[in-house]
C-alpha cells in the first residue's frame, strides 16, 4: 500500500535512506546522496506539504519517495536533449527502499502514473541500477539537468501514450 508519510514514520524513513545510501555506495555511486542526503528538514517539509509517500506491506514501511505535482524548478533547464512535452507534469524524487521486497520502484511508479499521465524523474550518471529500472518502467532518457548543488543528473520523462496524441 502507498500512503502519505507521517511524522511518526521518520525513524523508518531515515533507516531506509541509510540503507539506500549504503547500497548506492556499494554499487559505485557514493556521491549521489553522500552520507546525509536527504536531510531531516527536507523530509519534514515534504511530510508537511504531503509530498512524501511510503510503501508499506503489513504496516511495515519498505519504501519512500517524494511526489510533487506541478512544475519543478529542477527541470526548468535541460541540456544535451529536450523534454518530450511541456504540458503539466509531476516529479518523482528521492526514491529508496530497504531491499526487503523486490519491485518497489515499479509499485511507486504505478501509483504515480495513476495520479499523472506525465512524469519526470532524474538520477546520477553512476546510478546505473536506477537508470535501468526507470527505463524499464516506461521512461525515456531526455538529457541532463542540474540539481540545486549544481551537479548533473540524467533526466527521464514518461508520457502516457493516450495523452501524447
Image: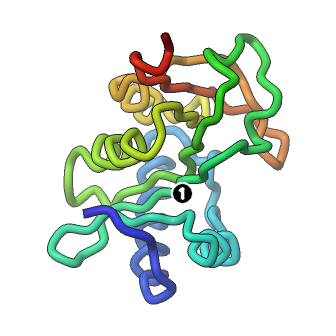
Q: Residues within 10 Å of mark 1 (few under 14, many from 20)?
A: many
- Which residue, given by chain and number where applicable, does mark 1 sit on? 66
Find numbered disc 1 in the image and state the secondary structure of the residue it sits on.
Answer: strand
Q: Eyeballing the image, is 74 above or below 76? A: below
What quarter of the picture does the N terminus occupy? Answer: bottom left
| In front of the other: 94 or 86 | 86
Quick one: which residue is furthest to the bottom in this view? 8
Q: Residue at x 49, y 74 (%)?
A: 14
In screen coordinates, is 15 left or right of 147?
Answer: left
Q: Is residue 64 left or right of residue 122?
A: left
The part of the image, by quadrant, that contains residue 63 is bottom left
Q: Residue at x 72, y 42 (%)?
A: 71
What residue is shown at x 44% (from left), y 57% (from top)? 20
The x, y position of residue 17, in whole percent, is: 48, 64
Residue 100, percent from left and from top: 22, 60
State which quadrant residue 112 falls in.
top left
Residue 67 rendering spot, x and y as whole percentages: 53, 53
Q: Is residue 117 above or below residue 10?
A: above
Q: Residue at 49% across / 23% down in the picture?
A: 159
Amino acid at each position: 500500500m502507498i500512503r502519505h508519510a507521517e511524522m511518526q514514520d521518520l525513524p523508518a524513513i531515515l533507516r531506509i535512506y541509510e540503507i539506500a545510501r549504503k547500497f548506492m555506495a556499494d554499487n559505485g555511486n557514493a556521491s549521489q546522496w553522500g552520507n546525509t542526503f536527504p536531510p531531516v528538514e527536507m523530509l519534514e517539509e515534504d511530510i508537511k506539504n504531503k509530498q512524501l509517500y511510503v510503501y508499506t506491506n503489513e504496516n511495515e514501511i519498505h519504501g519512500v519517495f517524494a511526489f510533487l505535482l506541478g512544475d519543478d524548478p529542477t527541470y526548468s533547464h535541460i541540456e544535451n536533449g529536450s523534454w518530450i512535452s511541456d504540458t503539466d507534469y509531476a516529479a518523482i524524487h528521492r526514491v529508496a527502499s530497504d531491499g526487503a521486497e523486490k519491485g518497489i520502484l515499479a509499485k511507486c511508479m504505478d501509483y504515480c502514473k495513476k495520479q499523472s499521465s506525465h512524469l519526470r524523474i532524474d538520477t546520477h550518471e553512476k546510478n546505473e541500477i536506477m537508470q535501468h529500472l526507470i527505463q524499464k518502467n516506461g521512461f525515456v532518457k531526455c538529457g541532463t539537468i542540474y540539481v540545486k548543488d549544481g551537479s548533473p543528473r540524467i533526466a527521464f520523462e514518461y508520457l502516457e501514450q493516450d495523452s501524447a496524441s
